[in-house]
Amino acid sequence: MPQWTQVVTDPALGQSGYFAFGSAVPRRYYYHVPAVVRADSPVIVSVHGISLNAAEHMVRMRQEADRIGAVIIAPWFDRTHYRGYQKLLCRDGETRADLALIDMLEDASERFGVDTSRVYLSGFSGGGQFTHRFSMFHANRVIACVTCAAGWYTFPDATSPYPLGTAPESGPAGMSPHPQARKVPMHVFVGSRDDRVEPYLNMDDDVIAVQGVGRLMRAKRWVKAMRQDRKQHGGADVTLTRLKQLGHDFTKAMERNRLDARVVESFGLSSSKETIDA
């Protein structure tokens, strides 16, 4: 089991917990539901990186969620069943992390009575890889996407096969990017010091040739490529924020840089600039 499994919350502020269902390939997620929930309450999905800290994602986000009346869903992609979840199709060549998330959202909809057909999607590190790729192939389910400190990206290059690019029918199970993929607003957060080469960073030659070295450089190049693509073909904004004095650390991003409030604001769910800058 992951850390943070024991979750305590004030009933006046809502309910937090953990659900698991399914057998061969289980679906597991942490959740937080505010004290008052409606069918049209916003649903924010927060996806962990390789540390598998799904519960921490939920706990770190729930204060902001309570403030704006949003539901939090934090999927847990364990190493046994979901190795390589960052690319949607896992390393076993069969398990689909993207479809697993959709199952979790449908389960949450039934349990909480909230509409999960379209969500606000965010993720950190490996979760940031997952979020921008999910948004490309399931744009009909994403209102807006935030990618935080992704290690590498799928570029809007129709001549390169997935996951490097978006060549037709090269995606998971032969998928092509969703027709509305360019309509999803995207924002990237990355630490101003997140430029180190680490053991888990993809250092394949073909990645370095296009994306460079270090998460900061790769974020800049991807945002530039996405902006150019959407300027040519039409689409929503793709924006970038560098978080000051931050390396690659989810907890510090939350505690020092108020990433929770920044994510919520980037979704257009809050006008909390005074809170972020405090």
Image (cartoon, rainbow, N blue to C red):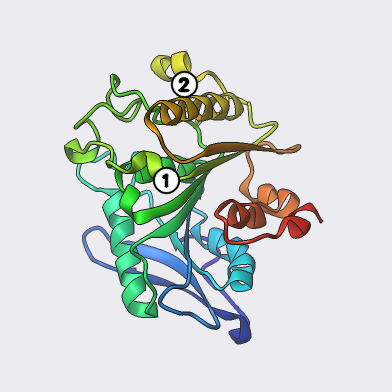
- As measured in the structure, the alpha-carbon distance from the residue carrying label 2 to the one carrying label 1 is 28 Å
Q: Disc 1 marks which amino acid?
A: Val
Q: Residue 208: x percent and y percent?
A: 47, 17
Q: Nearer the viewer, residue 26 or 34?
A: 34
Which residue is painted at 26% across and 48% down in the image? 96
Q: Quadrant of residue 18?
A: bottom left
Image quadrant where one finds the C terminus: bottom right
Q: Residue 272: x percent and y percent?
A: 70, 60
Q: Which mark is residue 42?
A: none
Considering the numbered disc 1 on the image, is that residue within a helix, a strand or a loop?
loop
Considering the numbered disc 2 on the image, is that residue within a helix, a strand or a loop?
loop
- At label 1, counting other C-alpha atoms closer than 10 Å, the crowd grade (few under 14, some 14-19, many 20 or more) is many
Residue extending farthest to the right is 278
State whether residue 48 is above or below residue 200: below
Which residue is painted at 23% across and 41% down in the image? 92
Q: Residue 5: x percent and y percent?
A: 51, 68
Which residue is painted at 36% across and 66% down in the image? 116
Q: Quadrant of residue 87?
A: top left
- At label 2, counting other C-alpha atoms closer than 10 Å, the crowd grade (few under 14, some 14-19, many 20 or more) is some
Q: Confirm whether residue 206 shows in the render.
A: yes
Instruction: Residue under label 1, please give it.
Output: 184
Tell me if label 2 and label 1 are in contact, CB under 8 Å: no
Q: Confirm whether residue 86 shows in the render.
A: no
Instruction: Residue under label 2, please give it.
Output: 203
Which residue is painted at 25% across and 35% down in the image? 171
Side of 241 where 25 appears, left or right: left
**Mark with earlier residue (2, 1):** 1
Q: Disc 2 marks which amino acid?
A: Met
Q: Residue 31: x percent and y percent?
A: 47, 69
Q: Quadrant of residue 106?
A: bottom left
